Image: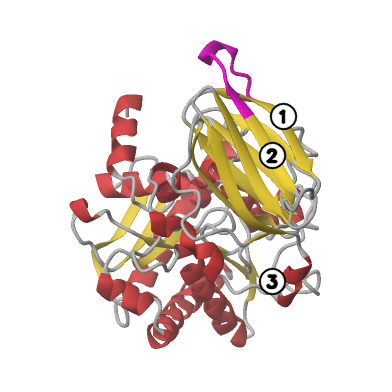
Amino acid sequence: MTGRLNHKVLLANALVCAGLLAWLPLSAAFAVESQIPRPAVAQSFPVASDVRVAGDDKQTRFILDLDRSVDVRAFVLADPYRVVLDMPQVTFNLPKGVGTAGRGLIRAFRYGLVMPGGSRMVFDLTGPAKIEKTYVLEAANGQPPRLVVELAAVERAAFKPSRPDDDKLQLRPSVVADASGGAVETTGTATTAKAADSRPVIVLDPGHGGVDNGTQAPSGESEKTIVLEFATALRDRIEKSGKYRVVMTRDDDTFVPLGGRVKIARANAAALFVSIHADALPKREGDAQGATIYTLSDKASDAEAEKLAEAENKADAIAGIDLTEEPAEVADILIDLTQRETRTFSNRFARTLANEMKNVARMHKHPLKSAGFKVLKAHDVPSVLIELGYVSNKADLQQLVSESWRSRTVASVAQAVDAFLGKRVVSATP
Ligand SMILES: [Zn+2]
């Protein structure tokens, strides 16, 4: 597929899922910060209460009002041009809708948690720029402490992306740990006593989180919250049987990069990886509805699947993480063989899942699809991605936030997991 076509597809699909925040200034997209229930300890974090952007397309100043001084690290990224501000965990009490439109060099900005203890702001720039200064002003003359970032436009040729040192680009420890080490810390309750635990591991992967809300319903519900609730209920349901151990890639509102999610699956030698998302369709593209189950494929099963995978794969860019230096996949005949077997298992599980889910939940008219989702790329872990429904569809949304729908659907997924893994265990016995 050509770059030009990719670009077109992306624009046409701007409302789908992860693409939402990156490409369209929708006022609803940012309202979610205030809707997330915050733990009581949030009181102890610095609070950001207001934000102002001043200047023009040559020089732009960004000012964030805080209740105390924070340490900030700022860097610039290209493709697309962005400024990323990393800081200790901050409680963002910013006015509703802030960030949807910027000024001068800042087209829009977003913010959220990227790891426990760490917050991030990401500016989408209108063009190449450099950070002239970043500083924090102490409270003075009745003004609160302020974080100030000064940007200046540069020529395309003069633009220098800052590559943050690896030790500075801190992600949550579970994500950066060496997958071969086996001692990977994971989220959730299932990490203790795992050495002696020989039960098959199921990794549940609620999509998006933190700085990346995923798709957004017109009424404000965000994908990251809907799928976290679903995954948590599914974990509880699966663990109740006592037959499996469940590991969550996230169990709070934290951003986890796509590659980190795959690493968690591999590090835990997962028997199954289930990524959970909720889709959205722009109004002009009609009103799709129902759940879809995706598997990995080099060649997308249809244009819609391809667009969706592209949008979902944007998640890391949305959080400001640059993917350009990800190591190329190792070409190895053994990996290739494993991969083929894994894909067979993934497809088998997807069919089992569709059969179970269709009894209790409304399915998309073509419920089984495939495309190049990054999060499904563990070559040795059968992986599927469920789009539970469309937050852009009224009836779907009603279900997505309904307790009874969730509990029925969770039960059907748990049933499929058991049917699939039960069979695998049997077939592996001599
Ligand atoms: Zn998603």
- The answer to whether residue 283 is seen in the rendering is yes
- Crowding around mark 3 (Cα neighbors within 10 Å: few <14, some 14 to 19, many 20+) is some
Check disc 1 and report its element: helix, strand or loop. Answer: strand
Q: In the picture, which quadrant includes the N terminus? A: top left
- Crowding around mark 2 (Cα neighbors within 10 Å: few <14, some 14 to 19, many 20+) is some
Q: Amino acid at mark 3?
A: Gly
Q: Which residues are magenta?
A: 151-161
Q: How far is mark 1 from mark 3, CA to CA?
A: 40 Å
Residue at x 81%, y 46% (from the top left corner): 138
Q: Is residue 158 magenta?
A: yes
Q: Quadrant of residue 167?
A: top right
Residue 209 picture location, percent across and down: 56, 59
Q: In the picture, which quadrant includes the C terminus? A: bottom right
Left or right of 401 on screen, residue 195: right
Give yes or no for contact between labels 2 and 1 (Cβ–Cβ under 8 Å). Answer: yes
Where is mark 1, residue-wise? 133
- Compare residues 127 and 227 and report the one nearer the observer: 127
Where is mark 3, residue-wise? 188
Query: Can you tell which mark lies on residue 148?
Result: 2
From the image, state whether disc 2 or disc 3 is nearer to you.
2
Q: Is residue 116 magenta?
A: no
Quarter of image, ligand 1 = bottom left
Residue 108 picture location, percent across and down: 48, 42
